[in-house]
């Protein structure tokens, strides 16, 4: 059998973005998906394309990726629901307002437009927020997409350029060979694991599942205009031990509101849990009391692929595996939708020995060789 | 928070029989129903004007409701169950003109008597105002819709069509035809089996008498609903017998393709469903020891089956033997199998929708856009089919028939609820505390 | 109790018999309950609370299943857009 140039395991948004990049080079590409394409974390996520400044490396990757989204925005099909909503980081009090000013400077230095909103400015932009909030930071370049359709678009593009999709589970992947659950065996020069949270193909993957709950409402166009996130979100996203909730509401193009967010370790059950859901909703309604009356259509959970330093694994598996054919594109925690296009670009650069637009070293998998796994209760 | 020994979901014939039997035998019973008053689909409270003459059907209804009242079981209408746990708790939503109320109920034993809904199949024009479900139009009539003088075509499949046509005729509508997709050869053995069910035969004869002006077209189906001159409302339907096609002008179309069991709560609780229906034993017990199921969710078998199954389930909850009833229940089940064969959907109905025909009415997803996906989840994620407020209750069974994909994953909330419904803690529920059910001596 | 009640549908006042559901009041007034995602006027289909086609704005509250709600004196009903 003629070998593939590359086999990609996982057709979530990351695997699909990688597949498209490879197909664009004229490579012979095979994509392997054991579930539904885009049916993993990509189906569960919020689709907020956002610049985050948790660390300089995170800021660099999210800013780079967002710029790729922006460049392509005019060419995305309607189904991707790309909308340049902008983010408002909401500050509840003066202490958080000080933080707003600090972050504004960080963004500015990175060349990311960010504007400080006063209390009145915030109320004017989002009248359904409760009164008495201190203000906020508006990041106008952030956007909202519908992740399954974005992943579907990447994969369709890859197929159009000749990529083949195998709907079967990869049972093993090593030394350039992938064995599928239906008995088929495929060979390739390189194998990319874009497996989300699933580590069975490479048990040394330093990834932990971090559960999140989401709630979608019926259509209420105009109720919210920007993606609104409490400034404390970073704190809660940063914590690696406790369960946490934060106010995070997203206006969908449909007029629906998508409500997050919660973070839990050590719970791998997909069922929604009443207790954390209640905390999450209480938090949301504290910021936006009018949400209480809105009609909820569905509640679901998803799992983020968390790493110890909250940065993804992009590049050769060296350090985690001896196998020179293995490459990784995984561990995107709560930013895989944002970072998929950037990650695909960095991975290609590494494979081709091209210089990248940003420094790719912080994301190299080998850095987590001695996986310092976050402790959990 | 309200506690009760036996909680019944559904106040149709099965739920009424179940609640009555359990309460008469000493259980504290509460019955919940989404509808405002007891009766279910068939005995739906005729709240406006009951113009139809009192028939045997009405007598059965009156007797059943009267006996329920005397049994001491408490009926709470207007409560939609949106979440449930087999450990013994469920939540309901009550909607009124001015808002909504969430309540919690704790139970020792649960009887699911959630009935069925109509199966709708998409065809060009089926989203036009003027096109209703068959049972749909009937229940809207019971909600005060006046049909006198309107020309109506009743179409689809199943025994419901005749019942609806009769009701329409009673209310003064001109039922020009009843269009039944099942072929005569398919129906004949079922019709013959009716001889074994005298009560059903009498019902059938009474129906026929009301419809002497109506053509009963067997082996025919509606191809398309066509807008009238205003382009906004139904004006006519195209009907075919497979070789010949003709147009029938009408003001209303009542079209439904038999029934789909409401098994969402059973699925949520984790009851076994080997196929479309909830699995029960001789006492109507599901695979969960404290959960019973009666009526349509265990098999579409009609009124008598629902009543006898309900009674068996109620007796089982009260710990009383139902052996004498079980033979009758078995006979009714056989009737159900016969009915399923008689009204099996013909292949041709799969080619009714055109590429631009809407399949998912909530999200306006067309038939054409559903092609090329691997299954329900794939198509749902990419097209939004089934993502609207009905959560696939309408398009799910249709897509299953058209494309063979089985909808997956039932989740809470089973119906849309206000966000604050999730914020309920026990102490807050106390605000809405209701009286413990009062039991009269049986 | 009065035999009829007065409600407002899309700004117009209407008398309906007591016990009429809001979905039926909309049908009698020949007003769609909602405008669909692609702009079609829709009306009640199932009459029993499962299809959600009868959703309308009742007393200012969006997305109410009108086939499950009875008309009340002075109620306002609007087509959901
Ligand atoms: C609640 C929540 C909210 C989020 N919000 C946002 C947000 O607002 N913005 C943002 O940028 N990110 C967000 N994320 C994160 C984002 O959803 C994920 O980072 C992203 O979807 C990851 O994509 P992926 O392709 O790596 O993984 P997945 O989408 O999980 O894809 C992995 C795929 O690999 C397949 N697979 C795995 N193993 C095998 C195998 N052995 N054989 C075959 N196939 C296999 C799986 O079936 C799956 O389809 C959120 C996540 C959650 C859970
Ligand atoms: C931006 C956005 C907007 C959305 N809007 C809506 C909306 O308006 N309405 C709506 O209803 N939904 C909406 N969704 C929800 C979306 O459909 C979710 O991803 C939902 O989880 C999938 O729905 P489902 O029940 O069809 O499929 P799932 O429940 O996800 O089913 C997928 C399949 O995977 C299996 N599966 C999933 N997880 C596991 C697991 N851990 N273990 C074993 N099997 C598993 C299931 O059994 C099932 O067969 C939206 C999602 C996003 C991202
Ligand atoms: S008419 Fe179907 S829900 Fe009201």
Image (cartoon, grey):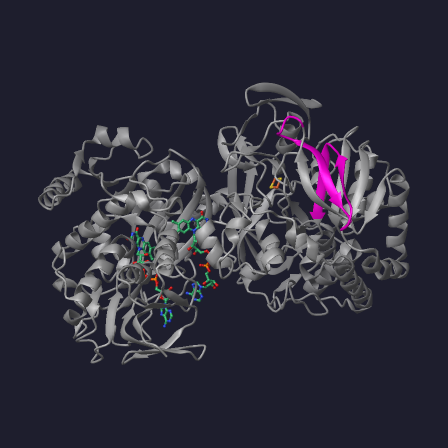
**On the picture, is C41 further left or further right than B245?**
left
- Measured from the top left, where is residue B167 in percent x and y? 80, 39
- Measured from the top left, where is residue A305 in percent x and y? 29, 63
Residue B238 in magenta stretch: yes
Q: In this view of the protein, which residue sits in the foreground, A279 or A226?
A: A226
Q: Quadrant of ligand 1?
A: bottom left
Range covered by the magenta-colored residues: B229-256
Q: In this view of the protein, which residue sits in the foreground, B430 or A370?
A: A370
Q: Count the marks.
A: 0
Residue at (51%, 34%) from the top-left corner? C39
Q: In this view of the protein, which residue sits in the foreground, A215 or A15?
A: A15
Residue at (44%, 45%) from the top-left corner? B428
* Figure quadrant of the C terminus of chain B: bottom right
**On the picture, is A149 further left or further right than B15?**
left
Q: In this view of the protein, which residue sits in the foreground, B160 or A180?
A: A180
Judge whether A281 appears above or below B150 on screen: below
| Image quadrant assignment for residue C28 | top right
Judge whether B345 appears above or below B272 on screen: above
Residue at (58%, 54%) from the top-left corner? B399
């Amino acid at each position: 059998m003629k070998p593939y140039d590359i086999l990609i395991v996982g057709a979530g948004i990351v695997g699909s973005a990688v597949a498209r990049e490879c197909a664009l080079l004229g490579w012979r590409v095979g994509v392997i998906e054991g579930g539904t394409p885009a049916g993993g974390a990509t189906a569960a996520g919020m689709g907020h394309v956002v610049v985050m400044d948790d660390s300089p490396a995170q800021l660099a990757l999210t800013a780079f990726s967002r710029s790729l989204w922006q460049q392509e925005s005019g060419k995305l099909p309607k189904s991707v629901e790309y909308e340049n909503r902008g983010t408002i980081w909401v500050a509840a009090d003066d202490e958080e307002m000080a933080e707003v000013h600090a972050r504004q400077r960080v963004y500015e230095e990175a060349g990311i437009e960010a504007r400080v909103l006063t209390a009145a400015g915030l109320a004017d932009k989002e009248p359904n927020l409760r009164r008495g909030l201190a203000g906020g930071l508006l990041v106008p370049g952030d956007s909202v997409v519908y992740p399954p359709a974005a992943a579907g678009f990447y994969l369709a593009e890859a197929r159009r350029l000749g990529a083949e999709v195998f709907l079967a589970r990869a049972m093993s992947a090593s030394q350039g060979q992938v064995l599928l659950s239906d008995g088929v065996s495929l060979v390739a020069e390189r194998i990319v694991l874009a497996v989300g949270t699933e580590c069975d193909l490479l048990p040394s993957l330093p990834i932990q599942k971090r559960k999140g709950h989401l709630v979608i409402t019926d259509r209420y166009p105009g109720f919210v205009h920007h993606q609104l996130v409490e400034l404390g979100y970073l704190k809660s996203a940063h914590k690696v031990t406790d369960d946490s909730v934060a106010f995070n509401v997203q206006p969908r193009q449909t007029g629906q509101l998508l409500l997050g967010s919660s973070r839990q370790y050590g719970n791998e059950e997909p069922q929604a849990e009443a207790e954390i859901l209640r905390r999450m909703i209480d938090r949301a309604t504290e910021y936006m009391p009018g949400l209480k009356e809105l009609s909820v259509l569905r509640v679901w959970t998803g799992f983020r692929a968390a790493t110890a330093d909250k940065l993804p694994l992009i590049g050769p598996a060296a350090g985690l595996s001896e196998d020179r054919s293995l490459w990784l594109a995984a561990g995107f925690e709560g930013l895989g939708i944002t970072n998929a296009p950037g990650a695909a670009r960095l991975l290609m650069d590494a494979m081709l020995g091209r210089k990248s637009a940003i420094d790719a070293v912080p994301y190299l998998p080998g850095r987590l060789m001695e996986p310092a796994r976050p402790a959990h209760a | 928070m309200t506690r009760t020994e036996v909680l019944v979901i559904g106040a149709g014939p099965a739920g009424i029989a179940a609640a009555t039997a359990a309460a008469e035998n000493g259980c504290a019973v509460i019955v919940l129903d989404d509808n405002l008053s007891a009766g279910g689909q068939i005995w739906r409270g005729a709240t406006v004007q009951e113009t139809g003459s009192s028939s045997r059907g009405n007598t059965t209804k009156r007797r059943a409701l009267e006996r329920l009242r005397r049994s001491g079981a408490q009926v709470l209408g207007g409560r939609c169950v949106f979440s449930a746990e087999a450990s013994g708790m469920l939540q309901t939503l009550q909607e009124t003109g001015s808002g909504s109320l969430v309540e919690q109920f704790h139970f020792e034993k649960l009887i699911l008597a959630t009935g069925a809904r109509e199966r709708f199949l998409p065809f060009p024009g089926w989203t036009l105002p003027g096109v209703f479900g068959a049972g749909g139009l009937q229940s809207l009539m019971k909600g005060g819709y006046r049909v006198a003088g309107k020309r109506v075509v009743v179409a689809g499949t199943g025994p419901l069509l005749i019942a609806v046509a009769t009701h329409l005729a009673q209310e003064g509508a001109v039922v020009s035809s009843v269009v039944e997709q099942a072929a005569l050869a398919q129906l004949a053995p079922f019709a013959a089996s009716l001889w074994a069910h005298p009560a059903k035969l009498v019902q059938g004869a009474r129906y026929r008498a009301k419809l002497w002006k109506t053509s009963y077209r067997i082996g025919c189906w509606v191809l398309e609903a066509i807008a009238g001159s205003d382009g906004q409302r139904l004006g006519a339907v195209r009907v075919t017998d497979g070789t010949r096609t003709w147009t029938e002008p009408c003001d209303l179309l009542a079209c439904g393709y038999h029934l789909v069991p409401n098994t969402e709560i059973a699925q949520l609780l984790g009851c076994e469903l080997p196929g479309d229906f909830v699995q029960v034993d001789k006492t109507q017990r599901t695979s969960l020891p404290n959960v019973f199921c009666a009526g349509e969710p265990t098999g579409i078998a009609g009124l008598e089956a629902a009543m006898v199954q309900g009674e068996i389930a109620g007796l089982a909850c009260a710990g009383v033997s139902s052996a004498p009833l079980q033979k009758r229940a078995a006979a009714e089940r056989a009737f159900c199998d016969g009915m399923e064969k008689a009204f099996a959907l013909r292949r041709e109905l799969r080619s009714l929708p055109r590429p631009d025909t809407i399949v998912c009415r909530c999200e306006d997803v067309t038939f054409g856009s559903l092609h090329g996906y691997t299954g329900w989840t794939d198509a749902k994620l990419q097209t939004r089919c089934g993502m609207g407020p009905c959560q696939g209750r309408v398009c799910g069974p249709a897509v299953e028939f058209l494309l063979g994909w089985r909808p997956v994953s039932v989740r809470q909330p089973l119906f849309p609820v206000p966000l604050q419904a999730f914020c309920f803690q026990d102490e807050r529920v106390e605000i809405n505390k209701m009286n413990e059910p009062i039991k009269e001596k049986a | 109790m009065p035999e009829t009640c007065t409600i407002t549908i899309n700004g117009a006042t209407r008398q309906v018999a007591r016990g009429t559901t809001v979905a039926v009041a909309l049908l009698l007034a020949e007003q769609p309950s909602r405008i669909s995602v692609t702009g079609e006027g829709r009306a009640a289909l199932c009459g029993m609370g499962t299809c959600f086609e009868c959703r309308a704005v009742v007393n200012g509250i969006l997305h109410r299943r009108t086939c499950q709600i009875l008309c009340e004196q002075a109620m306002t009903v609007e087509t959901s857009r």
